[in-house]
Amino acid sequence: MTAPEVNISLFKILLNGDQSSLSIVYDAIDDNIPVIAVKDTGGLADFIAIAYKVVYPSNGKTEEELDKTVKKMEKTEFKNEIRDEIRTKIQMRITIGTDENIEEDKVLLSFLTDQTIEEFVNKIIKPQGYFLINILEYDNGRAVLALSDGILQAMLFGKYKYEHVSR
């Protein structure tokens, strides 16, 4: 007698995060596990939120948005503009940041080389990265989107969309 098959949904939540967290995010994407980066918690989570918003300003999670961005990214000058805009937005956070996040933003900026930024952008312009990464807005201790909604969004967009687009 064999045990019935059980499906368990997995996802990862990134709060803050440092350089070592990046490989965990990459592994999750490679394993088709949705990642929820909580914006404004500092560190890598903020980098992911910033980079994702720069690459996908509308954050509509449509196949058309993905296709349009992939076409633009074929141009080296556009890739350079995206990389520079991401770096500028992080530097602006340091300039106007509060005492509590300036140091962690400086640490973040120190490990975000051009190569690291380009690797991440290349990861999120593929269907797997596009649909599996989700940003949860967090504003002054209050989630703009409830965590349960963020999890549901990650599961629906991540698993369903990626599986259907990649076929």
Image (cartoon, rainbow, N blue to C red):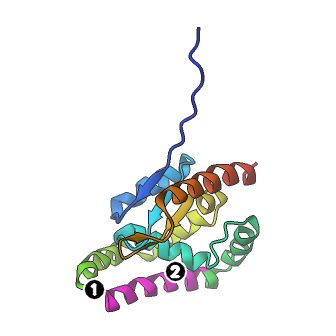
User: Disc 2 marks which residue?
Assistant: 83
Name the mark on residue 98: 1
Quick one: label 2, few (<14), some, or many (20+) residues within 10 Å?
many
Q: Which residue is drawn at 44% across and 83% down?
A: 87
Q: Is residue 149 left or right of residue 110?
A: right
Name the mark on residue 73: none
Q: Nearer the viewer, residue 126 or 149?
A: 149
Quick one: label 1, few (<14), some, or many (20+) residues within 10 Å?
few
Residue 8 place in picture, x, y as percent = 53, 36
Under tag 2, what secondary structure? Answer: helix
- Count of residue discs: 2
Q: Is residue 167 above or below residue 122?
A: above
Q: Which residue is drawn at 57% across and 56% down?
A: 154
Dominant secondary structure (helix, strand or loop) of the stretch shown in magenta: helix
Residue 5 place in picture, x, y as percent = 60, 24
Disc 1 residue type (three-letter): Thr
Q: Is residue 86 magenta?
A: yes
Chain part drawn in magenta = 79-97
Q: Quadrant of residue 7?
A: top right
